[in-house]
Structures are given as structure tokens and as C-alpha cells.
Image: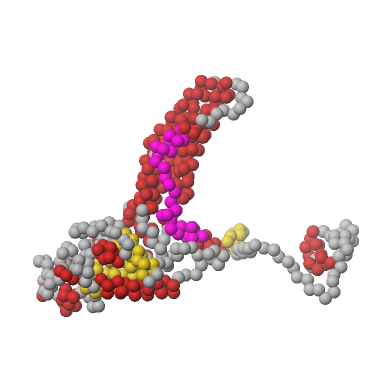
Amino acid sequence: MTSGSFTLLQLWQLPYSTLLFNRTKLCKGLYPLPRMKIYPLCFSKQMQTTTYEVVKGSYLETSQTKHENKTKETASETLDTVGAFQKLPMVMPSVDILYSSLRKAKRIAPTKGIANAAKREKNKGAKQLDALMKELTLPLRTYKDNFPNKRQLHPYERSLIELTLGDGNYEEVLGKVDYLRKKLVSVGKEHASLCAQSTTKREAEERLVEGMRKLEEIFLSDGKAVDDLMQIAKTLRAMPVVDLEMPTLCLVGAPNVGKSSLVRILSTGKPEICNYPFTTRGILMGHIALSYQNFQVTDTPGILRRCDEDRNNLEKLTLAVLSHLPTAVLFVHDLTGECGTSPSDQFLIYQEIKERFSEHLWIDVVSKCDLLEESPVLYVTENAEDDNDELLKYRKVGPDGALRVSVTNEVGLNELKNRVHEVLVSQSARLNIQKPEGILDNISSPRKTFI
């Protein structure tokens, strides 16, 4: 080694100023400028650090690093699943997928330039079977990848899936679709390989027919899972879109107390109105425009007096809205006895819901006030002597501060609208205060933010 050359180890150990300005064969002709400070340059898009610990002679990531990486991955996944129901792919009927795939596969021609008839036939057969397998499984792969994992959804959307489709049904159908895909891939590759190994033209033709028959048979047998997934997609897409940044008013109460009539009066929503319990069979949305501001109104199924374990899915939908969405509450009371739920039962329902969701802004409304009489309604199953002072007062006028309205006679509606506006403006101020900052500094927050 000459005096003017360096080994890699020596170069590594030399100061950066020596490397840049020393007159060697490596850097010939470079001279340092007087009074010039030299700083090392570093071009890096993002620096990633990981901490390791030695465990039994091996380097392993520390638990803190794993937790940080997992947190970043979860944040990214959460951002991708906002408004998941509106991003669901269109699912084709299983019959359409099958016959479209068969048509495309049969158009596949053998590779050009094969003179031998047997080789040409087995080449065509293998290519057609491979094409059929791919055409059948491509949409199934798309469905599996684009239907969201339920665990990554917002709690409200997760509750909608469980209560609307049944607990576990969503994952079961997706599992069946993926199982069908894997089965088609396995059988398709097997028969394409057999066809490619044919020794005669006749054998290649027979194996092609057998392979196509087998793939068609499997798809017809298990393709019901695709049709079930199509129905699931239609159901979820029909769910009302809730803007989590827009102030929302949720109407709550026992069945048939007049919630849907008030939704029609207050908003653009047009729910069904009938004189029987559980007319509202899902979450219905309407909108209000007041003083150049937009608000949402939610009509929910009625709640009965019973423990949570005994509630039906419609009641659980109402509780899911109150639990997972930032709403103000308009609780509707019917003291006329027409709704089918006694005033004493409504009083207990009211106490339970208000205690459970005490952090929500609240409005109490006594509906059908044109039908109220001077003497309070008492059901045959009730005993007035057992009533305490609070319940006796409730039977007559409802809870303290309740507004008395009548949709039929248009009594108290203007006062109700003004009160609703005040509460929604307060709810808007709450949302602005509680709005979280972006999850990651370099990622802008989406339109719909979970709160």
C-alpha cells in the first residue's frame, strides 16, 4: 500500500474534513477555504429508529418499539376505514360471475407457432383452465380485500353490523367467500397441470372438459356465499350516513310516543308513521337548516322497560347511537296512555337512559298534549298508592322543564324548534372543543373524525 492510498477501514476512521480537503490521490486538487466552517450533510426523507435487546444470543425488538409500530399501523388502518360502508365494492351475482368467466376463458387461443396438434390442444386447455380459475377468483379476492375488517371500524359502524346482520354473520360470509376462492385456485391449478401433461389431443380435450366442469360445479355449489355478500353490501350501503362533525339531535322514547311525527316536523326526514309499536325499524336520518347552519336529526326505535340482556336488536340500535355518536337527546314522553307503555314504565325508562347518558345535552318533550286530561292516566296493572311524589308529578306534567307539544294542533312547535336550535348550537360548540388533532402530524385528518 502506497503512502497516498487508504484502506476502507482507514477511510472510515479519518475525519470528514481530511476526506474532503486533504491532498491525496483520492481528493487531488482540493484546498480548504480560510475561515470556512465545514458541516456534515445528511439527506434523509425520514429517519427510523428501532431499539433492540439481546435475548438468548439474539437481537429482538423491545416491547416499546413494537408498541409504537403497532400504534402507527393502527392509526393508518383507522384512517382508511372511515365511512367504510360507502366504500364497499359492488358485488356481482354469482351466476353473472360464472358465465362471464366461462365466456372469457373459452375465447383463449393456444400459443401461436405450435405445429403439433396434441401439443397445441394441451397448451390451449391449460391456458383456458388457468384463465377460468383467475376470472372466477379475481372478484372474490377483490371482495375479501375491500370489505373492511370489523375490528377496525368505528364502534357505531361495528354495532350496526352486529345488530343488523347478526353477530358473527358478516365474518362468516367473508370467510366462506375466501374459502371458495382458495378451493377454486387449488382445483384450477391441479386440472391445468393435468391438461398440460396430456400425451394426446383427445386426452387434452377430455381433461379440459373435466376441469371446466369441476370448476363450474364448485362455483355453483358454494357460490351462495357471493350472493349473501351481495345482500350484505346492499344492506350496509343503505345505512344512513352520519357526519360525525355535524351536530346531531337523537329522538328517544318508548315505542309509538310520537318520535317519528316530530322528526317530520323538525327535519327533512320522512319516517313511517303508524299506530303500532316499533314502527321505526332502523336508524332514520333527517336534516335541519337553521340560520345558515346544517344539523342532523336521528329517529330511533322505541325502548321498553327491561334489562339490556332482554332487549331486541332494534332497542340495541338506539343504545348504540347514544353510546357511540356525539348527539344531543330529545326524549319524548306520552302521558295519554295511547302508546301502549304506561307512564310509570316510561318514567323508569327515562330515569335509566338519562342516568346512563347524563353527559348528553337534553330536551324533554311531552307529546300529544291535546289529548291530555286533567286526571292522570292509570293502567289497570298500576297501583296509584305505590307512587312516590316524583312519579305522581310525572304522571301529570312530565319531567321538570318539559315542553308540551301537539303535532295535530300545532301547539308548542315554534317553542320546540327554538329550543332545538339552541341545543344544537351548544352541541356544535362542544364538537369544536372536543375535535381531536390529526392522528399523525404528516397526515391530514379526514372529513369524518371519530370522537
Q: How many marks?
A: 0
Residue at x 18%, y 75% (from the top left corner):
397
Q: Is residue 432 magenta?
A: no
The image shows residue 115, relative to residue 302, as above or below, that is above
Q: Is residue 303 left or right of residue 128?
A: left
Locate the N terminus by quadrant. Answer: bottom right
Q: Quick check: can you spot residue 320?
A: no
Looking at the magenta stretch, what is its main secondary structure? helix
Q: Which picture quadrant has residue 352?
A: bottom left
* Front position in the image: 18 or 317: 317
Q: Position of residue 38 (x, y in %)?
A: 78, 71
The magenta stretch is 76-102
Q: Which picture quadrant has residue 420?
A: bottom left
The image shows residue 206, relative to residue 27, as above or below, that is above
The image shows residue 403, relative to residue 127, as above or below, that is below
Q: Which picture quadrant has residue 50?
A: bottom right
Q: Is residue 87 magenta?
A: yes
Q: Position of residue 103 (x, y in %)?
A: 47, 32
The image shows residue 109, relative to residue 284, as above or below, that is above
